[in-house]
Amino acid sequence: MQNAQESRPVLINLHGSGFVLPLHGNDDEFCRLVSRKTDYTVLDMQYRLAPEHPFPAALNDAEDVIKWVLAHPSRFDQTRIALGGFSAGASLVLAAASSVFPKGTFRSLLAFYPTCDLSTPPELKKAPDASGRPISVFMARIFNQSYIPASVDVRDPRISPLFAPAENFPKNLLVITCAYDNLAPEAEALAAKVEADKGHHVILRRMEKCGHAWDKGTDQEKKKDEAYALALEMLGR
């Protein structure tokens, strides 16, 4: 058993939201699983939401929490800081790891069905499996317009992490995509880009017959168990 005085590894998790929806706590099952099955402390953080607080407010909030963890080495093992996120939260942790903090700050990153490219119009994004129900173009436009100020370059890697240098990402990267999700191709492109850079351990898994956020209140329990098990395995590296 670990001594209470020893620093512990930590997972900072950011929930999905479309950058707009107040869904903090939606990842409770996943966070509790990590806490129960690993020696990681889990910080499931809130962040400010658009349109009241557009970019970069949410990313700044993530930065503040990460800096707080970095400022407490006696409490948190600085060699085992991991980031995790779902949907918009995954986009935020990808951006934080690749464009805000120095290379090597984070040991692992877990990205569940992330938004990776907000420069491509929603109507041009197509799911790998067209037989499902993707995010509607209408909703995607609302999310994007609420989050991104008109004056901001949408190819900024802090908004679209697909454009960040591959070498900036953590050594260990898990990317989970969904076959019915029109965000899957951009996330898979990011995973391929990072994997092509030497020195990275990348696991990319597309969940067939699953849509965006399928693991929240779904009958696809086996797929959810598989995805969460991959996350635990990555944290164990």
Image (cartoon, rainbow, N blue to C red):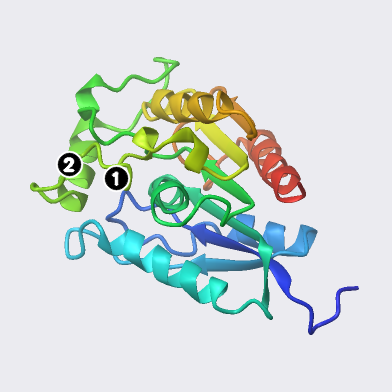
Q: Secondary structure at mark 1?
A: loop
Q: Position of residue 79 (x, y in %)?
A: 68, 61
Amino acid carrying mark 1 in the image: Ile
Q: Any mark on residue 1, and which?
A: none
How far apart are labels 1 and 2 at the CA level? 8 Å
Q: Are marks 1 and 2 in contact (CB under 8 Å)?
A: yes
Up-down: is 71 above or below 204?
below
Decide if residue 77 is on the left or right side of residue 195: right
Give me the residue at 45% from left, 16% from top: 129
Q: Position of residue 219 (x, y in %)?
A: 60, 38
Q: Secondary structure at mark 2?
A: loop
Q: Position of residue 210 (x, y in %)?
A: 52, 29
Residue 32: quadrant of the picture: bottom right
Decide if residue 203 is on the left or right side of residue 47: right
Amino acid carrying mark 2 in the image: Asp
Disc 1 residue crowd, few under 14, some 14–19, many 20+, Cα 10 Å:
many
As drawn, the residue found furthest toward the bottom would be 5
Residue at image mark 1: 159
Decide if residue 237 is on the left or right side of residue 223: right
Disc 2 residue crowd, few under 14, some 14–19, many 20+, Cα 10 Å:
some
Up-down: is 87 above or below 12?
above
Foreground residue among 205 and 99: 99
Decide if residue 209 is on the left or right side of residue 81: left
Residue at image mark 2: 153
Q: Position of residue 166 (x, y in %)?
A: 48, 34
Give me the residue at 40% from left, 60% from top: 23
